[in-house]
Image (cartoon, rainbow, N blue to C red):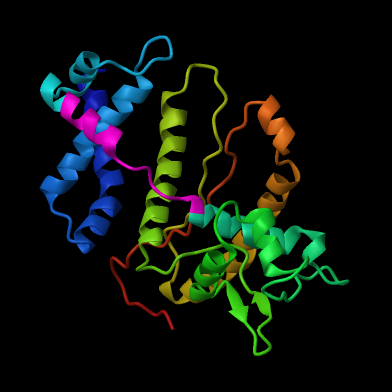
Amino acid sequence: MSDVAKRNLLRAFRLMLGPVVRLLLRGGVAWKEAAEALKTTYVEVATKDYGLHGRPTNVSRVAILTGLSRREAGRLRKALEDESAPEFSGMNSATRLLTGWHLDPDYHDDAGKPLELPMTGDAPSFADLARRYGGDIAAVTLLRELTRNEAVLRLPDDRLRVVKRYFMPSPLDPAAVLRAGSVLQDLGNNIAYNLGRDEGAVTRFEGRATNERMISGDARAYRAFLEREAQAFLERVDEWLTLHEASPSEQKKYRVRRFGIGVYQIEDQLMEGRDDEA
């Protein structure tokens, strides 16, 4: 890679790091801790992505690729082997349960609306819904998280009403921080794939719509527009994915992979002028 290309890449890297560093500073993470995490990620990616014949990269090659000493690369690889994987199962199970509640006709009334469910009993009940869509997470655990995050309401008669389509942890919840990391990872993987793909390979969709001449007072109307239109789009995608989801027998027969799309709001901090937002 030429010096100019490397400088441009490092400049882009600083742009990517901005929101990450902002989050780290808010959480009290000092630069040395972040540097250790960066070194570890260098070793992780070099190990996984630069092996030969489908095998992980050996320590010597990792050291050459990353610029770390062989001893340091070995230490970080050992730390990665001992590190437990991030726990996404709870979030995934909660979202799948909410999707099933909204899409499965067994849990709909005659008008096609999600039923209010008793906690226990035969279908339709929350316990049965959890068995179908909650994976190995206990029904009481799922309900506790869903009610805590106001995705499900417990009514005076103890029946349960679903009020949200997706599980979204509260901002201070550790699960919310983990989710934020996974969102940035998905977006970064998309960009890295498109920039590094082989010539002629199909690109992965990535686009945005922005305008730099918006009056700040229109922010509320814009957010309402996004809540309506973006949410409707995500629900259509969710229905398509659910309709085409591989059955258990197909999952054993065919190679499966994760499909999806992310939608996020763009609204820069006010730089100049008067803030007229109501």
- For this orientation, the residue located farthest to the right is 110
x 56%, y 61%: residue: 138
Q: In percent of the image, x 73 and y 38: which residue is there?
A: 247
Residue 165 in percent (x, y) is at: 63, 64
The C terminus appears in which quarter of the rendering? bottom left
Quarter occupied by the N terminus: top left
**Residue 38 inside the magenta-drawn segment:** no
> What range of the chain is rendered magenta?
74-89
171 relative to 35 in the view: left or right: right
Q: Position of residue 144 (x, y in %)?
A: 51, 71
Q: Is residue 80 above or below residue 131?
A: above
* Closer-to-camera residue (154/215): 154
Q: In this view, which residue lies farthest toward the front? A: 121
Percent of width and height locating residue 35: 16, 41
What's the residue at 13%, 53% (across, down)? 30
Residue 120 lies in quadrant: bottom right
